[in-house]
Amino acid sequence: MASAAPAYAQSPPPDCLDVAFSGDSCKCPGQGQNDFSYNLSVCFTNTCPAGSDPITVTVLRLVSNSGVTLCPTESEVLVIAPGATVCTATRWYFSANSANFIDVVYRIGDGPETSTPGQGLASPPDCGTQEGQASCEDAPESCVP
């Protein structure tokens, strides 16, 4: 009797899923003893051919290139149809230090954890420097780990 393959067996190849920060994502570089905060939304684009199954992604956490997990660490599940881009909710994240790159740790279907290739995504520009971005003064109380 045949059984269904696990969901991750149908996971797309890594080149079928693009990951980037949304255009309104930004960072607030800390000064002196200040916290380092980021207003981020992570977007996934399913570049698989039309007719392919949607991709289910669970965003697990964000980690700075210095190895610090940004807080809060709320996971979010996204279902991305072929040709679509879906983004996480925009939220404030905090760290004890600045990062030039941020690694997005996620899972495709029920598969193993994976993360953005290389060093991770380049940190977004400073907040308030582009239209539509939040201001650093908008950041709520920090949850620095």
Image: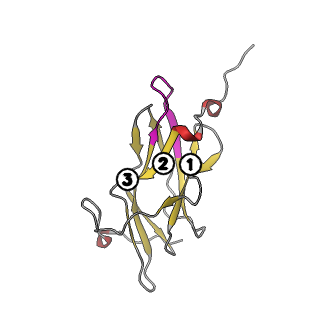
Q: Which residues are magenta?
A: 45-58
The extreme bottom residue here reads 32
> Is residue 42 rendered magenta in the image?
no
Q: Circle 1 sits in a helix, a strand or a loop, which is it? A: strand
Is 57 a magenta residue? Answer: yes
Say left or right for 53 vs 125: right
| Image location of residue 132, percent across then percent down | 25, 59
Sequence-earlier tag: 1 or 3: 3
Of residue 119 and residue 59, the one placed in the foreground of this image is 119
The reply to whether callout 1 and callout 3 are in contact (CB within 8 Å) is no
Give me the C-alpha separation between circle 1 and circle 3: 17 Å
- Left or right: 13 with respect to 23? right
For disc 2, the neighbor class at 10 Å (few under 14, some 14 to 19, many from 20) is some
Q: Quadrant of residue 1?
A: top right
Residue 8 point in image, percent of width and height: 63, 34
User: Do the residues bearing badges 2 and 1 touch, measured as CB atoms within 8 Å?
Assistant: yes
Nearer to us: label 1 or label 3 = 3
x, y percentage for residue 63? Answer: 55, 62
Dot label at residue 60: none
Mark 1 sits on what residue?
106
Of marks 2 and 1, the one in the foreground: 2
Precedes in sequence: disc 2 or disc 1: 2
Three-letter amino acid code of the residue under disc 2:
Val
Q: How is the image coloured?
A: secondary structure
Q: Position of residue 138 (x, y in %)?
A: 30, 69
Q: CA distance from mark 2 to mark 1?
A: 10 Å
Residue under pointer 3? 22
Circle 2 is placed at which residue position? 19
User: Residue flagged by tag 3: what amino acid is it?
Assistant: Ser
Q: Are marks 3 and 2 in contact (CB under 8 Å)?
A: no
Residue drawn at x 44%, y 41% as measured from the top left? 45
Q: Amino acid at mark 1?
A: Tyr
